[in-house]
Image (cartoon, rainbow, N blue to C red):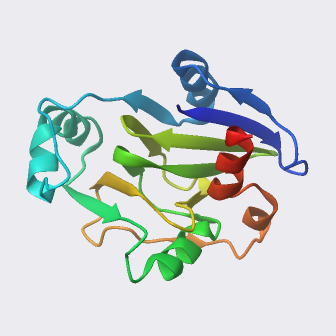
Amino acid sequence: MSILTIYAENTPEQGDRFTDFDSIETKLKPIGIQFERWTATQVLNNEASNDDVLNAYADSIERLKQQYGFQSADVIKLDSTHPDKVVMRQKFLAEHTHSEFEVRFFVEGRGLFYLHVGEKVYGLLCEQGDLISVPANVTHWFDMGENPHLACIRLFTNPDGWVANFTDSDISKSFPTLDELQGELAA
């Protein structure tokens, strides 16, 4: 289940939570965040190649390429056995911006995006079927958890792919991690 929690930037211990798609989409739209749900055009199994994944979502990818001028799409897969999971997690956990849109579609698994806009922080738990598009220069961070499980389609306008401009803020350390949120939800 997708979950949006909106916090005041100085009160990470409490926030307003939304779980239905329409409410999430409505709350994110004023800050320029596109949130969608996609459905594959074919069934994918665990052995699906990156090309299989891209082909399953080809129509939706093409629509976004036309809409925003994306030049390329790829697939990133991470699980608990990935040798660089700790380093990658730390990189994504640092608050940053990009000079282009950051678009992620969750083919499987989950991840927690935090968007720091004005004096608010929007925590969005994305799961299989969710697409998030973060506009250029929106301050954010991402948590894939200590033992990640995700496969995402990424779209780029920049031929160099993911390029971050780090803010050197430590705000991300104040907000719940993906693992803490999952623990809270399970309780």
- Judge by depth and name the residue closer to the eye, 181 or 26: 181
User: Compared to 6, does 9 lie above or below?
Assistant: below
Q: Residue at x 38, y 39 (%)?
A: 128
User: Compared to 30, does 113 lie above or below?
Assistant: below
Q: Residue at x 87, y 40 (%)?
A: 14
Give how far across and how far down residue 42 sits, in percent. Answer: 11, 32
What residue occupies the far front of the structure in this picture? Answer: 187
- Judge by depth and name the residue closer to the eye, 73 or 142: 142
Q: Residue at x 64, y 57 (%)?
A: 179
Q: Where does the C terminus fall, quadrant-wise?
A: top right
Count of numbered circles in the view? 0
- Judge by depth and name the residue closer to the eye, 141 or 160: 141
Give how far across and how far down residue 149 sits, in percent. Answer: 42, 58
Left or right, 136 with respect to 76, comes to right
Give how far across and how far down residue 84 sits, in percent. Answer: 42, 82
Left or right, 110 with respect to 125, comes to left
Give how far across and how far down residue 184 sits, in percent. Answer: 74, 44
Q: Residue at x 73, y 63 (%)?
A: 172
The image quarter containing residue 171 is bottom right
Left or right, 117 with respect to 63, comes to right
